Image (spheres, coloured by chain):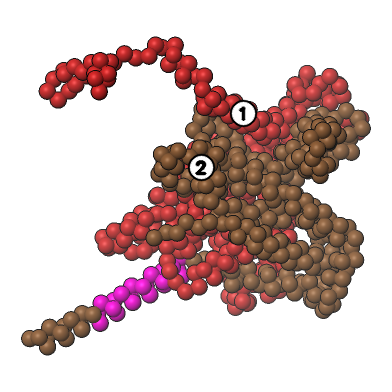
Chain colours: A red, B brown
């Protein structure tokens, strides 16, 4: 006690404030204690290791994009030149020009944009609707119905491709089309016999979206269900006490809270629809609307039979890939922070 | 008076109970309303598709000239044909054995990366943004372009090829199996481990590509662990290593189950899967290809179910659920 009193000086500054002054250990000693400990060294090693690993994986992710982009600017001479590897010697925009003008890129862009935006919007809203139903309401068969959602996730698409094609080629739910005749069918166009042909229209994907059966919708429902079950019940209860109905509560209270999560789902739905080639190959023949998969081919003006034709083909395909991805990348740059937010708020458990 | 009060009370109780029941019923009804889109779609669109697909397995299709089609019953013929197809059985087997390597690798990798991305550090947002690029962008069309590229490179590998850096082509240069084998032989571990490690390293692009969603789910799970648990651990003097095994792993174990199932399903259903692409090839084959592919993919689906059940059976023994009170 007395020892301590010798080292420290207690000064009373005012009535309620005191200041303690004590002899500090010299700066060098303090730094030594801090930076020469095994704890600190371990931290440094871990920090470097972590950084190296993350940068390495980032390299693995980004390098293909870089090599694709650089090869897309290469001209025919560059492919023959052995010394050219990653930086083109004679950069040219011919590949882009040929693809945009000859492969109908702009038309594909417009069509795919319309299709993807509508599908992604519908899927986002329907899945949040359904996910909310699963998360917040206790009703008979809730668990069973959710198992069905998981079931739709498990069944591979290829198992269903034939009957999916048949379903929409000869589209007729419970014979309704047979009964309705005229009016409705005119808007859907192409009738044959007693059923409607929906192939080469946007309807198959729209119908799948509205019913939450499209690509990976089970995953979206799962994600949104987890998110909504994390929202406290009190929020809805207070809305209900204030006299809001279930739907009004959902739209005005719950949905605004779910916006980051919904943007995440929208991003997934949009970009997976954008780059999708399973459904587009299945539902759209060559006579249908021009979509992204249709532009992946070598334009006539670029077709060569030289020694490097393999590389040219690869480069042209990659350029097509870049052109397809460009709009997505722009969107990702703007929306990625919502994805991170969506993850941070989702708090998925069990 | 007393009698009146009692009856009023009874009345009140009756009224209250009735009201409560009706509220519950109303909530249940709106619950049904919310899941209605899915339910309708499932009954009206999905079930016919599923049943149709099952039906096609046992039939042959004749497209009629006047529109419409006719089914001819052939029994189990399609299944026998699928079994006689040597390529199908072979791809099925290699696909299955590939999965046994893939599941643990993808799970470990995505958990590890999720833990890294969950730590506070400089540039975390940038790293996260980059790590989610593959899952969003390298799917479907782009994946198939990449696949055709690596095929082209493979055919072109005798000459000098440009480094597209996709799939196998760039990866071949990362580690060679023989180098690692000699390294491992000095360390007296089995050759299997060496080949496993080289496979993992060489497929790193593929693995990064396929662990995006898993990473997301793990990250969300890690965010869901209450910081107060970690705080109390620190107060008790647990090292980070102990904290990981005693806290993080048990708390994240339900996510491991979810991710394992997702990984199995995803690698079974993805387009890059060899079996799937073979089934697709059969589907586009002239003649009875489409019904045959239906039969094949149903057999494949049954296999998926078996694998999922096995995985669930193994992992759910170790899953820890935090009791909520």
The rendered magenta stretch, by its main secondary structure, is classed as helix
Task: Residue at 55% x, 31% y: name it.
Answer: B126
Residue A92, image quadrant: top right
Q: Secondary structure at mark 1?
A: helix
What residue is at 51 percent from the left and 50 percent from the top?
A: B251
Query: Which mark, residue A197?
Result: none
Tag 1 and tag 2 share a subunit: no
Q: What chain letter is assigned to the residue under label 2?
A: B
Figure quadrant of the N terminus of chain B:
bottom left
Q: Is residue B2 left or right of residue A129?
A: left
Q: Is residue A168 above or below residue A31?
A: below
Q: Which residue is mark 2?
A: B243
Front residue of A94 and B93: B93
Residue A213 position by quadrant = bottom right
- Is A36 or A250 nearer to us in this picture? A36
Q: Quadrant of the C terminus of chain B?
A: bottom left
Residue farthest bottom in this picture: B3
Residue A202, percent from left and from top: 63, 57
Residue extent of the magenta highlight: B14-34
Q: Read off the residue under disc 1.
A: A49
Please name whichever residue, A71 or A115, is drawn nearer the observer in this view of the structure.
A71
């Amino acid at each position: 006690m007395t020892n301590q009193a010798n080292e420290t000086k207690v000064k009373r500054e005012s009535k309620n404030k005191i200041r303690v002054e004590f002899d500090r250990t010299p700066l060098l000693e303090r730094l030594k204690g801090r930076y020469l400990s095994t704890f600190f060294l371990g931290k440094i090693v871990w920090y470097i290791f972590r950084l190296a690993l993350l940068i390495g994986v980032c390299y693995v992710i980004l390098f293909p994009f870089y090599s694709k982009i650089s090869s897309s600017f290469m001209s025919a001479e560059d492919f023959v030149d052995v010394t050219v590897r990653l930086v083109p010697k004679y950069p040219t925009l011919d590949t882009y020009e040929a693809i945009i003008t000859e492969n109908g890129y702009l038309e594909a862009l417009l069509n795919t944009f319309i299709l993807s935006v509508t599908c992604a919007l519908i899927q986002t809203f329907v899945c949040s609707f359904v996910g909310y139903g699963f998360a917040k309401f206790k009703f008979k068969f809730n668990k069973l119905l959710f198992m069905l959602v998981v079931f739709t996730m498990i069944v591979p698409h290829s198992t269903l491709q034939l009957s999916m094609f048949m379903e929409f080629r000869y589209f007729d739910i419970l014979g309704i089309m047979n009964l309705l005749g005229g009016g409705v069918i005119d808007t859907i166009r192409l009738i044959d016999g007693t059923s409607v042909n929906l192939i080469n229209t946007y309807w198959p994907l729209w119908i799948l979206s509205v019913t939450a059966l499209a690509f990976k919708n089970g995953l979206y429902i799962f994600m949104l269900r987890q998110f909504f079950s994390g929202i406290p019940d009190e929020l809805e209860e207070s809305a209900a006490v204030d006299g809001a109905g279930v739907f009004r509560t959902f739209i005005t209270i719950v949905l605004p809270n779910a916006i980051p999560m919904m943007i995440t789902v929208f991003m997934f739905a949009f970009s997976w629809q954008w780059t999708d080639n399973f459904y587009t190959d299945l539902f759209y023949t060559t006579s249908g609307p021009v979509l992204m998969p249709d532009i992946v081919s070598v334009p006539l003006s670029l077709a060569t039979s030289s020694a490097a034709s393999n590389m040219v083909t690869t480069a042209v395909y990659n350029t097509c890939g870049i052109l397809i991805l460009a709009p997505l990348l722009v969107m990702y740059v703007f929306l990625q922070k919502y994805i991170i937010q969506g993850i941070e708020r989702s708090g998925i458990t069990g | 008076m007393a009698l009146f009060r009692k009856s009023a009370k009874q009345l009140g109780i009756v009224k209250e109970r009735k009201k409560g029941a009706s509220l519950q019923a109303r909530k249940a009804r709106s619950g049904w309303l919310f899941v209605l889109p899915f339910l309708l779609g499932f009954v009206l669109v999905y079930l016919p598709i599923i049943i149709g697909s099952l039906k096609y397995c046992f039939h042959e299709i004749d497209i009629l000239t006047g529109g419409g089609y006719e089914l001819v019953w052939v029994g189990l013929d399609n299944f026998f044909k699928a079994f006689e197809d040597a390529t199908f059985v072979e791809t099925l087997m290699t696909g299955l054995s590939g999965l046994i390597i893939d599941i643990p690798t993808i799970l470990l990798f995505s958990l590890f990366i999720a833990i890294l991305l969950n730590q506070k550090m400089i540039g975390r947002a940038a790293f996260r943004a980059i790590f989610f690029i593959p899952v969003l962008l390298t799917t479907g069309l782009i994946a198939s372009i990449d696949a055709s590229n690596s095929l082209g490179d493979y055919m072109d590998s005798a000459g000098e090829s440009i480094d597209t850096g996709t799939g196998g082509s760039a990866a071949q240069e990362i580690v060679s199996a023989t180098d690692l084998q000699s390294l491992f032989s000095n360390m007296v571990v089995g050759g299997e481990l060496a080949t496993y490690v080289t496979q993992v390293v060489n497929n790193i692009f593929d693995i990064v590509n396929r662990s995006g969603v898993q990473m997301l789910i793990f990250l969300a799970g890690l965010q869901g662990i209450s910081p107060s648990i970690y705080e109390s651990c620190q107060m008790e003097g647990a090292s980070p290593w102990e904290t990981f095994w005693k806290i993080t792993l048990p708390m994240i174990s339900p996510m491991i189950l979810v991710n394992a199932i997702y990984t199995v399903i995803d690698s079974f259903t993805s387009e890059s899967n060899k079996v799937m692409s073979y089934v697709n090839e059969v589907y586009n084959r002239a003649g009875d290809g489409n019904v045959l592919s239906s039969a094949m993919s149903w057999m494949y689906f049954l296999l998926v179910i078996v694998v999922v059940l096995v995985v669930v059976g193994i992992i759910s023994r170790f899953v820890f659920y935090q009791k909520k009170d």
